[in-house]
Image: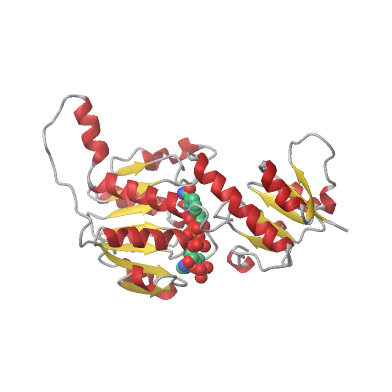
Amino acid sequence: MREIVYSTVKLKPEQRKMIEAYAEVYEAGEHGPEPKLENVNILICGPVTTVELNAMKNLRFIQCVYAGVDALPWGKIPANVVVASNAGSNADSVAEHAFALLLAAAKRILFFDSRVRDGDFEIVGESRMLHGRRLCVLGMGAIGSRIAEIAKAFKMHVVGYGRSLRSVAAVDEFYTQDSIDAALRGSDYAVVALPLTKHTQGLINYERLGLMRRDGILVNIGRAPIIVKNDLIRFLRENPSFTYATDVWWNIQNPSQDSDVYSLPNVVSTPWVAGAASSRETYEEMLRLAVENVVRYLRGEKPLNIVRHEDYR
Ligand code: NDP
C-alpha cells in the first residue's frame, strides 16, 4: 500500500509530483477527496491543530516547514513519530536580518531617520562600532554560524555558545552549555539564535543580561520566551544605554500585549519578518527544502534535521 502524505501548506505542482512518485498526496483546502486523517502517514505542516494530530493514528513522520518546531503540539506527538524541523532553510535571510537590527541599533538609524524627517540635522550622541567588539552568538546552528561568518567580515571578536559547533573558523572562542555566563560576560553585543526548547526557555534572565556591557545590544531573532520578559523590561528601564533589538515576540497573536517592550525607547523592532514572513523568495526555498526532506524519507534515507523529542516535552 502507498504511503499517504498530507500537507497543510500549499505545494507547487512540481513539488507535489516529486512526492507522488512515492506516495499519495493530499493538500488541505484543495478540491477533491480529502484523506481520512487516520490514514495519514506523513504530515507536512506549518501550524497543525491537536485535533488533527489526535486523528492521525498512523502518523510516522512530520516535516515542519519552519525552522522552529516549538509551536507543534508536542504533548500529542507519540514518541515513535519522527519529527524534522526545517533548520537552516532560511539561515541567510535571518542572519541578514540579525545584522540589520544590530546595525540599526549600533548606528542609531531610527533615531536619526525620524529627526532628519523633521529637518533636524543636529548630530547628538555617539554611534557604536562593530569592528573589534565582542559579539556573543547564542546558538551555533545554521543561523548562528552564518551570523558568525558575517561578524568575521566586520572583524568582530566572535564568541559562540551552543551544544555543537559547525565551523571552528567562524569563532574566536566557543563555550558549551554549562558556560553561558562565561560566553556572555563582557559582551558588547549578543544575538539569540537558539531554538525555543524546555532547556532554553527563560535562559536569559536579569542576572545574565547584567553580564553584558551596560551599553550593549541584545538582538533576538530566535524566539522571545528565551528571554524572561519582566527581567528584560526591568533591565532596559535601569540601563537606558542598553538596546534590545528584536524580531520575535511573546504574544504574536495579540501583539498589544507586548507593548510593555516595544514602547520602550531603547527597543528596536520588527514584526517577526526575519524568516519567510516578508520574503516570497525565502518561503519558496523553505518549501523546496521541506519537500526534498520528505522525498528523502520516502526513499528510505535518513531525513535531515531530526529533532530530539526530549528537547520539547
Ligand atoms: P539549527 O537547528 O541549525 O540551530 C540551532 C542551534 O542551537 C543548534 O546548533 C543546536 O545544537 C543549538 N541548541 C539547541 N538547544 C540548545 C541548548 N539547550 N543550548 C545550546 N545550544 C542549543 O536551527 P536554525 O539555526 O535554522 O534556527 C534556530 C532558531 O531560530 C529556530 O529554532 C527558530 O526558533 C529561530 N528562527 C527564527 C526565525 C524568525 O523569523 N525570526 C526564522 C527561522 C528560525 P545541536 O546542533 O546540538 O542541536
Residue 265, by quadrant, is top left
Spot occupied by residue 30 in the image (x, y as percentages of width and height): 76, 36
* Residue that sits furthest to the top in the current view: 118
From this viewpoint, is residue 213 visible? yes
Does residue 280 sit above or below 132 in this rendering?
Answer: above
Which of the 4 quarters of the picture holds residue 214?
bottom left
| Depth order, front residue of 296/242 | 296
Q: Position of residue 158 (x, y in %)?
A: 30, 66
Q: How many marks?
A: 0
Quadrant, the C terminus: bottom right
- Name, please, the residue furthest toward the right: 1
Front residue (pair 197, 104): 104
272 left or right, relative to 191: right
- Up the image or down, 231 lies above or below 117; here it is below
Colouring convention used in this rendered image of the protein: secondary structure
Q: Residue at x 44, y 46 (%)?
A: 274
- Where residue 212 sits in the image (x, y, percent)? 28, 61
What's the residue at 28%, 59% (across, down)?
153
**Would you say 69 lies left or right of 148 here?**
right
Q: Residue at x 74, y 36 (%)?
A: 29
Q: Quadrant of residue 154?
A: bottom left
Residue 200 visible, this angle = no
